[in-house]
Image: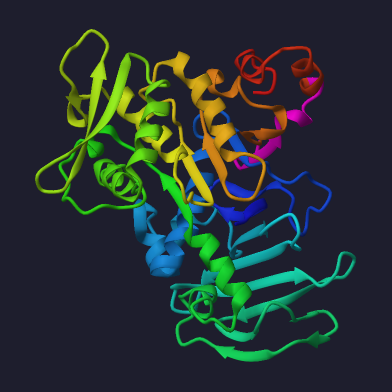
Amino acid sequence: MGKIEGISIRNYGSLKDITLGKTLSHQKEKPLSNMTTIIGPSGNGKSTIADVFGFIADCLEMGIEAACDAGNRGGFEQIRSQGIEDAIRFELYYRESSNTRPITYELAMDLDRSGRPYVAEERLRQRVESQGRPRSFLHLQNGTGYAFEGNTGGQDDETGVSDGVKIPVSLSDSRKLGVVTLGAMKQYSRIEKFLKFLRSWYLCYFTPDAARRIQTSAPQPYLDRIGSNLNNVAQYMYRENKADFVRTLSDIQTKLPGIDKIEPLKMPNGQVVLQFWEKGFSEPFFSHKMSDGTLKLFAYYLLLHEKNARQLVFIEEPENGLYHHYLSDLAVEMRKSAGTGFSKQLFVTTHSPFFVNSLKPDDVWVLKKDESGFSTARRTSEYEFVTELTEEGVEVGDLWYDKYFG
């Protein structure tokens, strides 16, 4: 359970200083909704925002230095904003449920004397009471600091006042995140929960060719980043609850144009493959024979039907390879899947007004570059008359297409 109510990014590529939603330093802003869509012209920072989420996820798995080099990032100096010598900084404002106090995660990374990236500062803090000042329950500088055990306790870093069980911490490797090390220990229960949330993120880079690959028969509960294990996920769902999986396929098939029926077929080696019946044909087609668009739509809808959903899903440009009339329905299904609670949150970047037409002004952010060449971010609802126009029936995507806000 949990979702991000806001994120601030400093000195990461074109994102020199942007904030989406509500953070500790932007308390008057509205929290991010369960579905946040980011629009704007090419080259204005949408993919960079997606890469921020991917970068944080990579930092968890491989450490800061390796993450800077992964995915063609080119190293720390290539991802830090041009002309900037300050640290790269992220601030996540996170809430586990409507009944819990928000948690702020602050992460700063810089170059050490040898020119290698390291974790300069890392902090988790939570408000003690509704009006009290947030207290740090993890604070590390260059790998050294303290952490508090249990679900309560923390230190006011201005006054030094603390309560709870405070443990000195000194990490042996300042290139690894402290939340990874301490989150593996039961006594740091709040850090453990936060780490579990971070590791539940799913960055989707689905490619139809990957979905056509022949995989081993091992069942897998979740789609991988590129969708290469689509049939493995089908096998897992079939094994766990065949009747429920068949119902899921029946629901998905109504949303795929030209498809009459989808059925699982169990092979002699135990693997499950999917049969697609197209209108006008008496024999089924298997996934490796399906069109790119059909495979992409199927993968997206299968993702939305996950039983134990990843808590944060980021999808870049779902419109690629899809007929534009399908995008409105996909956006509606994504909004429905995200819901209103704390079980799932979706982030999407798009160039499609057809997709955006199904969204509300508060859910859509516009990225533009200012005169300095760095990106700015603004909710469409903050543009003059946008909310009033949409209440009268004008759709957000149409306003965008007409260059009302860029």
In terms of image quadrants, where is residue 277?
top left
Indicate whether residue 384 is drawn in magenta: yes
Q: Which percent across, then down, holds residue 397?
A: 61, 19
> Looking at the image, which residue sits at the far front?
243
> Looking at the image, which residue sits at the far bottom?
168
Frontmost residue, 198 versus 280:
280
The answer to whether 271 appears left or right of 76 in the picture is left
> Looking at the image, which residue sits at the far left?
268
Indicate whether residue 49 is drawn in magenta: no
**Residue drawn at (81%, 53%) of the image:** 27
The answer to whether 94 is drawn above or below residue 28 in the figure is: below
**Residue drawn at (47%, 51%) of the image:** 308
Q: Which percent across, then down, holds residue 241?
A: 35, 46
The answer to whether 352 appears left or right of 106 in the picture is left
The answer to whether 79 is drawn above or below residue 370 in the figure is: below
The answer to whether 398 appears left or right of 287 in the picture is right
**Residue drawn at (54%, 27%) of the image:** 331
Q: Which segment is the magenta one?
A: 371-385
Q: Which percent across, then down, holds residue 292?
A: 28, 25
**Residue drawn at (45%, 50%) of the image:** 202
